[in-house]
Amino acid sequence: MNQPVTTSSDITWAVQSGMRHWDERVKTVIGRLHLCDAYLARINVGDWEQRQEKREWLKTRVGPLVREADPAAVIGDPGLIGLVRELFGERGVMRLRDRVKQCATPNDATPTTPTS
């Protein structure tokens, strides 16, 4: 049974636990994309000008991560596909789907993991 947080030491433990969780998650590309998704949720509230500025900054970080990640893993994760759709629109999702199709039919000219 979950107990309510009652003391500052409990809050400190929760904060440290969250930090350890993200420290472990950011070791993988998918984990870094999940962190970006969490950040996007945070910046989607607040002042409109700051929100747009932060979203543009986040796009510059997410783009290279999406290109580096396994496209099937990104497509298969509802949170990450939402992140791509939110930042890059439906066109970004279609590009990911095309990359999955490229990887699904390997031949001499198409590696199983895209390099671009």
Image (tube, rainbow, N blue to C red):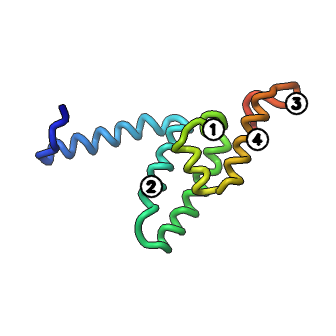
Q: Residues within 10 Å of mark 4 (few under 14, many from 20)?
A: few
Distance from the alpha carbon under mark 1 to that under mark 3 = 20 Å
Q: Is residue 107 visible?
A: yes
Q: Residues within 10 Å of mark 2 (few under 14, many from 20)?
A: few
Tell me the residue at 11%/46% (across/down).
Answer: 7
Q: Residue under circle 2?
A: 41
Considering only order in the chain, which callout, 3 or 1, is on the residue closer to the N terminus? 1
Residue 101 is labelled as: none
Tell me the residue at 15%/42% (across/down).
Answer: 4
* Amino acid found under the numbered disc labelled 2: Ala
* Amino acid found under the numbered disc labelled 1: Ala
Q: Is residue 33 visible?
A: no
Distance from the alpha carbon under mark 2 to that under mark 3 = 39 Å
Quarter where residue 20 is shown: top left
Residue positioned most to the left: 7
Q: Residue 90's x, y, as percent?
A: 67, 53
Q: Residue 42's x, y, as percent?
A: 42, 57
Distance from the alpha carbon under mark 4 to that under mark 1 = 14 Å
Distance from the alpha carbon under mark 1 to that under mark 2 = 21 Å
Tell me whether circle 1 and circle 2 mark residues in contact (CB < 8 Å): no
Tell me whether circle 4 and circle 2 mark residues in contact (CB < 8 Å): no
Considering only order in the chain, which callout, 4 or 3, is on the residue closer to the N terminus? 4
Looking at the rendered image, the disc whose residue lies closer to the viewer, 3 or 4, is: 4
Q: Residue under circle 3?
A: 109
Tell me whether circle 1 and circle 3 mark residues in contact (CB < 8 Å): no
Q: Residue under circle 4?
A: 98
Q: Residues within 10 Å of mark 1 (few under 14, many from 20)?
A: some
* Amino acid found under the numbered disc labelled 4: Asp
Q: Secondary structure at mark 3?
A: loop
Q: Residue under circle 1?
A: 69
